[in-house]
Image (spheres, helix red, strand yellow):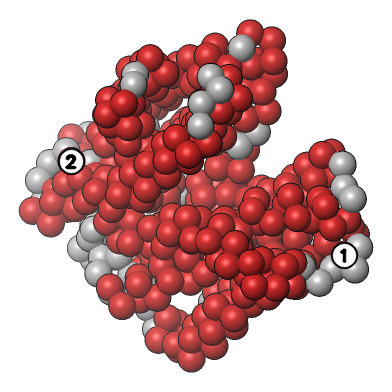
Amino acid sequence: MRLSILLLLSLGHLVVDLTQGGLPFLLPFFKEAFGLSYTAVGVVVLLSNLSSSIVQPLFGYWSDRRSLRWLLPTGCLLAGTGIGLAGFAPGYAPLLALVVLSGLGVAAYHPEASKVARRASGRYRATSMAVFSVGGNLGFGLGPLLAAYGYARAGLAGSLTFVWPAVAMFLLLCLLLPRIRGLGSPEALSPAGAVASGPGQEATAATVANPSAGSAAAAERRGNLPYGYAPVLALIAIVVLRSWVHAGLTNYIPLYYVTYLGGSETLARDLQTVFLLSGALGTLVGAPLADRWGLKTLVTLSLAAQVPLIYFFPAAHGFWLHLMLAASGFLVISTFAVTVVLGQELLPRHVGLASGLMLGFGIGTGGLGVTVMGAVADAWGVPVALSLLSFLPALAVVLTHFLPRLADAGERSAGKHL
């Protein structure tokens, strides 16, 4: 594991995701400054989501075809300057253009950085991806604080505070880019998780048991989808469902306790903070467990444990309410890095594309579930919408049946059978 490279990429991840965390805080002030309707504000969010998340697989596909290390410093610079200059926009159209510019920077950084993180990971791929991912978690959490600090000092012009960390990270990455380019390609795992010991020496357990299937298995391994389409589609669906849960709880915790129950905003803020910070801890704890127990095992256990916690938390009070939300946040986010690694294992020849699908498309599309929840809440009430969330992890557990069981780090190290 190249820890110094991973920490550098994680720091860049933090700088990039500062912008995604800061934009929601700035939206009310953009609305007031430009006299925007809620629909116009929604367009700002939509374009930010489309440019930063949905197009990530395109950047990933591009980075798989060419060496694009320059996307790392460029992505940081575009992400920070786009939001940093948004406070100086002379009108609504320039504001949209700057938000899209920032989103494209976010989309450019994630797949390339994830690919480099994999190459720096060694045997402990999930743990390494967690080191990279936690920077993003912190960026989302610190983004509103940075935006609030800038606004308190200079109003909308305070958005310029996002430029300085972006410029500093741009210069640092440019300086260290030769070292990043020096990383070799990651070792290619066979479908059974075995590492090739030399040219033509990789073999799956199935090939050993049935030598006549060797040529067919080798041909399949040379393909772009060594496990077929079903596991890839199932994993994308799992990520989307998990993202519905994450976005649903993040947005509906305040709505439930303030709007529906008439509780205090302080309680809603505290509960939301507990949920999000527990998720950052889950990223760091879940990935080493995945390296020890296996990627599929951790994903399945995490999803299954979410069902009762999410279903019963609206009925909890006091200490138990905080504990159940903390556990929910811990479990939901614990598999973010793990699913990125799973996607890279399922698409070993398209690591950038896999990263874009898991970090961008899957999460971005999952966010659309909040709209569905809104329709359910309008028709049947917020409690029904929250109850609906508890069934999504259960559906995702069923989909894990289609995921292959890959060797974990310990098994790869010891050479044990699956």
Q: Is residue 390 placed above or below 254 in the rendered structure?
A: above
Q: Amino acid at mark 1?
A: Pro
Direction from residue 124 to residue 26 in the image, left or right? right
- Give the distance between the C-alpha atoms of the residues marked 2 and 1, in whole angstroms: 50 Å
Mark closer to the chain start, 2 or 1: 1
Residue located at (78% from left, 42% from top): 42
The residue nearer to you, when weighing 243 against 193, is 243
| Residue under pointer 2 | 293
Q: Is residue 414 placed above or below 367 in the rendered structure?
A: below
On-image quarter of the N terminus: bottom left
- Residue 145 at x, y percent in the picture: 53, 61
On-image quarter of the C terminus: top left
State the mark number for residue 84.
Answer: none
- Residue 132 at x, y percent in the picture: 38, 62
Residue located at (70% from left, 73% from top): 154
Q: Give the SS element for disc 1.
A: helix
- Residue 377 at x, y percent in the picture: 64, 16
The residue nearer to you, when weighing 359 against 276, is 276
| Residue under pointer 1 | 94
